């Protein structure tokens, strides 16, 4: 109903999507929306923004410096051309050297690994470092 109420919106846009309701520690209900590729959206607003039906919801408020990007992603990410911006609601967006934007660090790391598979030795090293750091964080 929400998407259909927006100019250019339609319920058909989310046909095939799923929702999941999670109960938080304080008892609050959170509804998550998942597209057919498994991407998770935290609100109806994020879903609408992904289709270009609304703009500016996650307005950028700043871009991290080189040291902060390397700390948040992996050593050498800044030098490789990666950028990280923060939004007013404290989310981060990750921008690849070719300008594509990713919503999660995991998506950005997967892209870096994919590029490394067909890319340069430096990109492969950066992807390997990212994978090792991610594995260490999970331990």
Image (cartoon, rainbow, N blue to C red):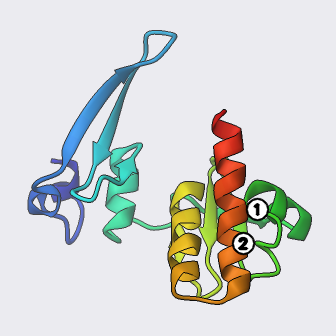
Residue at the image point whose x is 63% and y is 37% from the top: 138
Q: Which residue is drawn at 65% across and 89% down?
A: 120
Which mark is in front, 2 or 1?
Answer: 2
Q: Is residue 52 left or right of residue 74?
A: left
**Percent position (x, y) of residue 1?**
15, 47
Res 59 → quadrant: bottom right
Label 2 – label 1 distance at C-alpha: 7 Å
Residue 84 is tagged as none
Q: Name the side, left or right, on which 115 lies relative to 9.
A: right
**Quick one: SS at disc 1?**
loop
Q: Where is residue 57 in the image (x, y as percent from the top left)?
A: 51, 58
Q: Which of 27 and 100 is in front in this view?
A: 100
Quadrant of the drawing holding the C terminus: top right
Residue 76's place in the image compared with 90, above or below, is below
- Against 123, residue 62 (above or below) is above
Q: Can the viewer see residue 85? A: no
Question: Looking at the rendering, which quadrant does residue 121 occupy?
Answer: bottom right
**Residue at x 16%, y 63% (from the top left corner):** 13
Q: Can residue 124 be seen in this view?
A: yes
What kind of element bears circle 2? helix
**On the image, which quarter does residue 126 sit in?**
bottom right
Return the mark for residue 126.
2
Q: Is residue 125 left or right of residue 49?
A: right
């Amino acid at each position: 109903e929400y998407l259909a109420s927006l100019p250019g919106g339609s319920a058909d846009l989310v046909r095939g999507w799923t929702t999941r309701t999670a109960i938080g520690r304080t008892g609050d209900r959170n509804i998550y929306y998942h597209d057919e590729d498994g991407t998770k959206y935290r609100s109806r607003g994020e879903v609408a923004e992904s289709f270009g039906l609304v703009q500016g919801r996650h307005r950028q408020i700043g871009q991290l410096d080189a040291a902060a990007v390397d700390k948040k992603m992996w050593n050498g990410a800044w030098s490789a051309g990666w950028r990280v911006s923060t939004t007013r609601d404290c989310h981060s967006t990750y921008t690849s050297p070719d300008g594509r934007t990713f919503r999660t660090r995991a998506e950005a790391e997967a892209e870096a690994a994919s590029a490394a598979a067909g890319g340069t030795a430096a990109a492969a090293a950066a992807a390997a470092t990212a994978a090792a750091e991610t594995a260490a964080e999970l331990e």
